[in-house]
Amino acid sequence: MKFYPAKIFIALMLLTTVSCSEYNKLLKSGSNKQKYDKALEYFNAGKYSRSLTLFKDIEHIFSQSDQADTVAFYTSLCSYKMGDFETSSQQFDEFRRRFGRSPFLEESEYYFAKGFYYLSPKPENDQSFTFQAMQAISEYLDRYPKSKKRDELLENMIELRQKLYDKAFLNAKLYYDVGYYNSAVTALRNAILKYPESNHREELAYLIVSAQCLYARNSVPALQRQRYLDTQNAYYSFIDEYPESEYRKEADKMQDEAKKFLEKYKEKPDGTETEDNEEVTESAPSLDFSDQTGTTAKRGKAERKEKKEAKAAAEKEPKPAKEPKPAREPKPKKEKSEKSNKSDNSETSNGTEEK
């Protein structure tokens, strides 16, 4: 038997032309009953675009009829089958509000949830549709606990939840990757608190140790001690939960770094740090040699520092205002008798000198 590709192609073109002309004729001049029947026929044949066009054309006409829920349901389902999940979810949501007693209600709620499931993006993107899908699936399972779709939807729920785990992990790790270690610690801890059952929990706990250590290493000296102490706290929490972790060796190195720093730098009573090999002498007993020689005994660095700080603080204090000097009292005038006595005495002395 010989095949003639050209003839087959021409035959297919003729059938397509006839089919299109029939469809266009029905769309323009067919009765509503014909459009309804043909729309169902197209749907069952998988020609969702033509079916959708016909259903939309008669939707307003059947809105008050017994077939209103059928037309609305298949209109929504055509959108779903064509991959327009956002439109179909909106249509199914409207359907379940309008037709609460329809035999298509359970199926419409299933497709409503599945639409959001397919709209759920990769973990790197916004997860709003993921939350909507999980909510819709939960509502469906609560209303129809014995549904045949139950196992399928439970698997979908696990997949959606994993996206949330991945999203929380990626968000927290982003702060770590760009070097914002303090923010990373907060984000990593929040991820564990929000999703304690996450499969990323072990790595999150390790990254907290690493972020604390890097944060301490890159801090100013005055703040390093406390941040290395935070590193040790994170380390002990990590090994308590995951003693056999694959990240244990790296975590041990960070613990050693924190331990060496804290052993080398000890905290002074005033809160500052000093190295172990730094000599700190106690202040000499307060003898009274200073009054005789004008010098004091040698003191340690800590005391000299305290004196400088005290002196600087004293200089900063405002000086007390000087008290005004009391006004001088006027001298009392001497009596004339005293003046005359003085003059007599001067004359007597002059006379004696002349003699």
Image: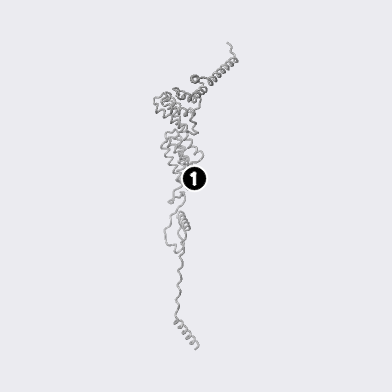
- Count of number-bearing discs: 1
Vertical relation: 252 (above or below) 330: above
Position of residue 3 relative to residue 104, above or below, is: above
Q: Quadrant of the N terminus?
A: top right
- Image height check: is 322 above or below 196? below
**What residue would you read off at disc 1?**
219
Question: What amino acid does circle 1 point to?
Answer: Ser
Q: Nearer the viewer, residue 120 or 218?
A: 120
Q: Position of residue 43 (x, y in %)?
A: 49, 21
Residue 123 on image: x %, y %: 49, 32
Residue at 49% of width from left, 45% of height from top? Answer: 219
Asked if one can make out residue 31 in the rendered structure from this viewpoint, the answer is: yes
Q: Is residue 253 visible?
A: no
- Residue 105 location, x and y as percent? 42, 25
Nearer to me, 224 or 169:
169
Badge 1: few (under 14), some or many (20 or more) residues near its Cα, within 10 Å?
A: few
Q: Secondary structure at mark 1?
A: loop
Res. 252 image quadrant: top left
Residue 60 location in percent, x, y? 48, 25
Query: Front-most of 5 and 20?
Result: 20
